[in-house]
Image: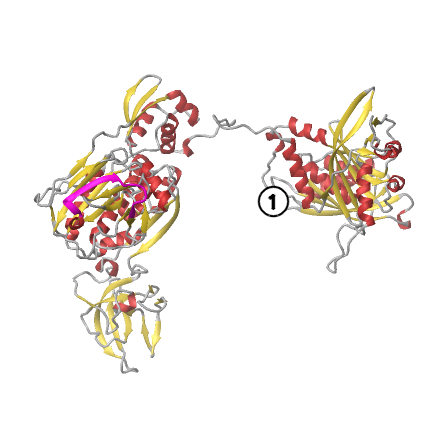
């Protein structure tokens, strides 16, 4: 919805700029999605002024050019002019240097100071086509005016420039679908009264053209008002009206229709003008027609009516789909001389059904189906009648017909101060609450120490409950004026939902698939030899009625059933494999049966497929550990405890734990175990205790899981060290020692090279390490950096027995 700032200022004075008004409206619930400039003439004649030619002499170097001196108010400037009709003492339109002209044809161009055939020219004396005011190029425009030199040309030509707000109107705010509606919000925001267009001059000139009105369906049409005008002259609207409608995106049609559109966007009340001579029997009947009746609308389409389509009919036939679309026979045409002007309040439910059935969307139906003001019909009728009379002439030729059998009541709502304070989150002074309500046209009809009884006008269709009133108070009081407490709380908002293990499993599965893994599902029944090969020493869970000896027991580990899948694929020449499985293992301890859910991960072959773009490495333990860390990160586990894995099933590996609970084991499978399933190539395997991760997630609240830290504004610094260590010293030890002794300055440690060889001695290894240092609060100095690195060197030498390679 487009709102003109110029038009809005006719309702209310506001001291702020259009941008500031837009911010106010947005913060109060009428979101301004854009601000645009409208110019009646493109460019708005900006930079063009009235000038006076003081002298005009023939150009010394060109027969068809004239060198002039022109007074433009602030100074006298030389201008070289090519028009044949330029002469002294003429009042002319001058485009100053720096201005941009938008000609009737061609591209815009900027006026610059230049030399023409050796003579300086600082501007341009304009013809009408050069500034978009016409098409003639016979000569410059000579003005008949006493306006002083330097007066903006836009002022002389009454060029309209406007700022237009594009408001994203929500469906509940039908009351704001007009300039009056927006002005009502500004009234409450600025605490200033608004001005309404006066209709005091309305009077009936004579009663020579009465139209009888009958409303048969008062449920669909609770109020219907109308009046006639005689002797109108249908023609194009004057420039000011066309400009105002164009500014808000409405195309002018003729003075009568434009007047009804003008009042629609001004007051929010749709109106319709009928050719009174086309009203058979001089009677209006508001009713529904039988289902299947055919009616031709203004767009020349025949439409089959449904039983609930409300129609405006004459004594013989339908003339208009009420509140939606006019008919082809009764509309205002150039030949129309007498009109019947309609202003009604239709039921939103009826209009909504009709709009949906016929697929017709109009400015009128947009408002009617959301709800208009039943109390404004006569006022809008008078406003439109006076406007048509001023634009098209004619006389008001009947009394106003106003059929309003049952007044639409105000909404009566009670609110408690306790709920106001609770929902807003702040105690607002009671007098301020009542003042806000008065500015919103909500009347206090009763008051107690605990709350208020209110009367809400029927045009506020969105305010029918206590919560609606409290929202109105809050949006005018200002959301920004409600301070944020140290501990936030809210009523009627859901808490963090219980963590769903199945959803979490799907998310982990999706993450693994995104990293190139395939999910497998294997049989829980397995070979007894597999369970016997495991170094657990546990009794197997045997099946009583075995299908076969090979499937005679429930598995104690996911290892072998996964290895069988690996073997199957390798035998089919698929050697680069990444699998995962969510499965169960089964155990018997102390005569009791136990079932555990685990996540197994299998990796073997090349890390990526062969490509000319990059060489591919064999999958290593570090590929597996990076996947495990990604899974842990999803559970908010960033720094688990790691220990060397000493278990017969693995050649080497690590165990991961936190809070004394084992979370995962990962490593390279022993060659002998892999061969039991027929796998000859190296396989890296991880088993993750799924219930432990779920318990970790469930016991950690959302606040603990979600940690946020502002990105440091200060730069990082990198320093490198080369350490010679005993082979049994792990990188995890290096990382732990560094972080414990760096005063939180070390943000990241990375191994960028590893060396083992004769040059450093037997049972030794050399780490080339990069350290990233950063302070959250200040820029690190060389002194602080050197102090930290020297401290780390000393600790590495003392605790890890490291030798620093120089």
Residue 440 belongs to the span the image colors magenta: no
Magenta part of the protein: which range?
A: 279-294
Residue 285 belongs to the span the image colors magenta: yes
Q: Which x, y percent locates residue 369?
A: 33, 39
In this rendering, the answer to whether 80 lies above or below 19 is below
In this rendering, the answer to whether 300 lies above or below 53 is above
* 296 vs 663, nearest the viewer: 296
In the orientation shown, which residue stands out farthest toward the top?
Answer: 449
- Residue at the location (26% across, 72% down)? 137
Q: Is residue 585 left or right of residue 456?
A: right
Res. 799 image quadrant: top right
Q: Is residue 127 left or right of residue 396?
A: right
* 296 vs 483, nearest the viewer: 296
In this rendering, the answer to whether 543 lies above or below 634 is above
Q: Secondary structure at mark 1?
A: loop
- Residue at the location (35% across, 72% down)? 114
In this rendering, the answer to whether 498 lies above or below 720 is above
Q: Which x, y percent locates residue 235?
A: 19, 57
Q: Residues within 10 Å of mark 1 (few under 14, many from 20)?
A: few
Q: Is residue 747 left or right of residue 646?
A: left
* 13 vs 654, nearest the viewer: 654
Residue carrying label 1: 714
């Amino acid at each position: 919805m487009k709102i003109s700032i110029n038009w809005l200022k006719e309702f209310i004075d506001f001291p702020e700029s259009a941008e500031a008004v837009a911010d106010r409206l947005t913060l109060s619930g009428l979101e301004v999605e854009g601000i645009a400039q409208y110019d009646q003439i493109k460019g708005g004649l900006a930079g063009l002024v009235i000038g006076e030619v003081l002298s005009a002499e023939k150009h010394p170097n060109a027969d068809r050019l004239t060198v002039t001196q022109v007074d433009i108010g602030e100074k006298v400037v030389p201008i070289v002019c090519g028009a044949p009709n330029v002469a002294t003492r003429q009042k002319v339109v001058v485009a100053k240097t720096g201005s941009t002209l938008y000609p009737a044809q061609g591209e815009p161009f900027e006026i610059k100071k230049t030399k023409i055939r050796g003579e300086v020219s600082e501007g341009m004396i304009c013809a009408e086509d050069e500034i978009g005011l016409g098409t003639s190029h016979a000569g410059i425009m000579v003005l008949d005016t006493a306006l002083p030199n330097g007066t903006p040309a836009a002022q002389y030509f009454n060029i309209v420039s406007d700022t237009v707000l594009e408001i994203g109107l929500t469906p509940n705010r039908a009351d704001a679908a007009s300039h009056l509606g927006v002005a009502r919000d500004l009234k409450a925001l600025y605490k200033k009264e608004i001005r309404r267009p006066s209709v005091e001059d309305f009077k009936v000139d004579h009663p020579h053209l009465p139209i009888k009105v009958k409303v048969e369906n008062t449920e669909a049409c609770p109020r219907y008002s109308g009046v006639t005008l005689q002797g109108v002259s249908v023609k194009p609207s004057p420039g000011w009206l066309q400009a105002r409608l164009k500014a808000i995106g409405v195309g002018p049609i003729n003075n009568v229709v434009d007047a009804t559109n003008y009042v629609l966007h001004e007051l929010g009340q749709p109106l319709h003008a009928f050719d009174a001579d086309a009203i058979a029997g001089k009677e209006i009947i508001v009713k529904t027609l039988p289902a299947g009746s055919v009616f031709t609308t203004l767009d020349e389409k025949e439409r089959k009516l449904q039983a609930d389509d409300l129609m405006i009919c004459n004594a013989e036939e339908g003339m208009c789909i009420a509140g939606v679309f006019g008919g082809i026979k009764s509309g205002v045409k150039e030949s129309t001389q007498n009109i019947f002007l309609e202003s009604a309040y239709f039921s939103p439910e009826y209009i909504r059904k009709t709009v949906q059935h016929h697929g017709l969307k109009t400015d009128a139906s947009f408002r009617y189906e959301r709800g208009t003001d039943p109390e404004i019909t006569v006022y809008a009728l008078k406003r439109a009648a006076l406007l048509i009379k001023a634009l098209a002439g004619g006389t008001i030729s009947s009394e106003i017909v106003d059929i309003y059998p049952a007044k639409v009541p105000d909404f009566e709502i009670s609110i408690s101060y306790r709920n106001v304070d609770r929902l807003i989150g702040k105690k607002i002074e009671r007098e301020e609450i009542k003042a806000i309500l008065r500015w919103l046209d909500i009347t206090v009809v009763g008051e107690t120490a605990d709350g208020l009884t209110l009367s809400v006008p029927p045009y506020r269709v969105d305010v029918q409950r206590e919560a609606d009133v409290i929202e109105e108070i809050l949006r005018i009081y200002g959301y920004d004026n409600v301070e944020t407490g140290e501990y936030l709380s809210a009523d009627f908002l859901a808490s963090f939902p219980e963590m769903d293990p199945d959803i979490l499993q799907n998310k982990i599965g999706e993450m693994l698939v995104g990293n190139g893994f395939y999910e497998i599902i294997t049989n829980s029944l397995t070979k007894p030899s597999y369970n016997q090969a495991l170094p657990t020493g546990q009794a197997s869970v045997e099946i009583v009625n075995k299908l076969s000896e090979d499937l005679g027991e429930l598995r104690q580990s996911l290892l072998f059933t996964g290895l069988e899948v690996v073997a199957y694929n390798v035998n089919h020449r698929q050697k680069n494999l990444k699998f995962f499985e969510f499965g169960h293992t089964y155990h018997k301890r102390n005569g009791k049966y136990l079932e555990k859910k685990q996540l197994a991960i299998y990796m073997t072959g090349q890390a990526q497929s062969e490509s000319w773009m990059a060489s591919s490495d064999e999958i290593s333990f570090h590929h597996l550990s990076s996947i495990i860390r990604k899974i842990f990160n999803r559970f908010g586990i960033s720094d688990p405890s790691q220990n060397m894995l000493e278990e017969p099933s693995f050649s080497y590996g690590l165990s991961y734990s936190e809070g004394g609970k084992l979370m995962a084991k990962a490593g390279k499978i022993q060659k002998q175990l892999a061969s039991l399933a027929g796998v000859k190539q190296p396989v890296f395997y991880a088993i993750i205790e799924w219930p432990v991760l779920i318990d970790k997630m469930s016991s950690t609240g959302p606040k603990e899981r979600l940690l946020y830290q502002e990105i440091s504004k200060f730069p990082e610094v990198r320093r490198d060290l080369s350490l010679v260590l005993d082979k049994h010293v792990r990188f995890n030890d290096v990382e732990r020692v560094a972080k414990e002794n760096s005063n939180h300055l070390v943000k990241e440690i990375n191994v960028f090279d590893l060396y083992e060889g004769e040059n450093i001695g037997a049972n030794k290894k050399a780490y080339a390490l990069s350290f990233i240092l950063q302070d959250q609060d200040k820029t690190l100095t060389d002194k602080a950096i050197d102090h930290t690195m020297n401290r780390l060197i000393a600790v590495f030498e003392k605790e890890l027995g490291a030798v620093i390679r120089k």
